[in-house]
Image: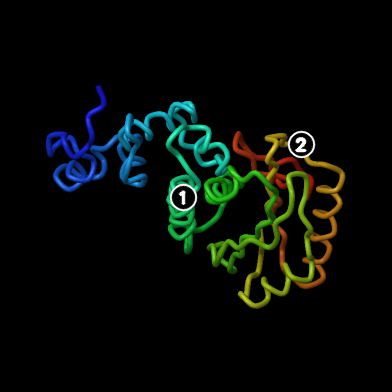
Amino acid sequence: MHKPIPQWADDEKPREKLALKGKESLSNAELIGILLSTGTKTKSAVDLGSEIMALAQNDLNILARFNVAEFKKINGIGEAKAITIMAAVELGSRRKLTEAVKQKITTSKHAFDILHPIMGDKQYEEFWMISLNRAGVLISAKRISDGGITGTVVDIRRIFKLALEENATSIILAHNHPSGNLNPSDADKQITKSLKAAGNTMDILVKDHLIVAYNGYFSFADEGLI
């Protein structure tokens, strides 16, 4: 029989449990329950959280890829609740980026670890640029453009205008493949060649171009293609 959260013992209620024992003591379903705030006549907010995690195969990376329609497959989850969860996931991704500022980027894996939480779960393509100073320390990571499921427009002038504004001496470029296919297309190879050439002209080193997906990455530099 469904028992509403207000009737639970205080040390079992998600909010009270967090206050008493700390956020680490809560399950993913309980944390989602706090975000949802309310359940339905037959399910608590935590029950809904459990259903959401089950739909995501208990994988937060899969959850991060959900759009509103995915969440609404669960009875009791409407657009407002779906957007609340999506906003929380996005805040977590942005926190990762904030933590990365002033780190020295020495490998493609390091760059991927910074970018994956931000763009690895996107359902459409985005193009990003990491700006580095002379010591190879991250100045910023910024989205340059976004597009559809199969591509995005890359504006070479905008990329190097931003690099100059930030006094970057080198940059790492990245775009995502929502399909999970990590093989570079002919268009990917051509834009990489054009960006490398433009960087040489402006004395800004294009160190790498990453293709990022939820399941891994491809590095042009590691493969000797840049």
Residue 220, percent from left and from top: 73, 46
Per the image, label 1 sits on a secondary structure element best described as helix
Residue holding disc 1: 80
Answer few, some or many: residues within 10 Å of disc 1's Cα (few below 14, many 20 plus, some between 14 and 19).
few
Can you give x and y, in whole percent of width and height, for residue 167 in the image? Answer: 62, 75
Q: Which residue does the image show at 49% across and 57% down from the upper left?
A: 97
Whether residues under marks 1 and 2 lie with C-beta atoms below 8 angstroms apart, the answer is no
Residue in the foreground of this view, choosing between 57 and 160? 57
x then y, percent, for residue 96: 46, 53
Which colour scheme appears in the figure? rainbow
Q: Describe residue 105's horizontal placement relative to residue 145 as left or right.
A: left
* Amino acid type for the residue under numbered disc 1: Ala
- 1 or 2: mark nearer the eye: 1
Q: Residue at x 70, y 42 (%)?
A: 177
Query: Residue 43's image quarter?
Result: top left
Q: Quadrant of residue 204?
A: bottom right
Horizontal side of residue 208 vs 95, given as left or right: right
Q: Residue reaching furthest bottom?
A: 165
Q: Residue furthest top?
A: 1
Q: How many marks?
A: 2
Taking depth in this image into account, of 6 and 138 the one nearest to the observer is: 6
Looking at marks 1 and 2 on the same chain, the residue that comes earlier in the sequence is marked by 1
Kind of residue sitting beneath label 2:
Asn
Residue at image location 71% in from the left, 36% down from the top: 182
Camera-side residue: 219 or 211? 211
Residue named by callout 2: 183
Q: Is residue 226 above or below residue 50?
A: below
Given residues 158 and 146, the one toward you in this image is 146
Secondary structure of the residue carrying numbered label 2: loop
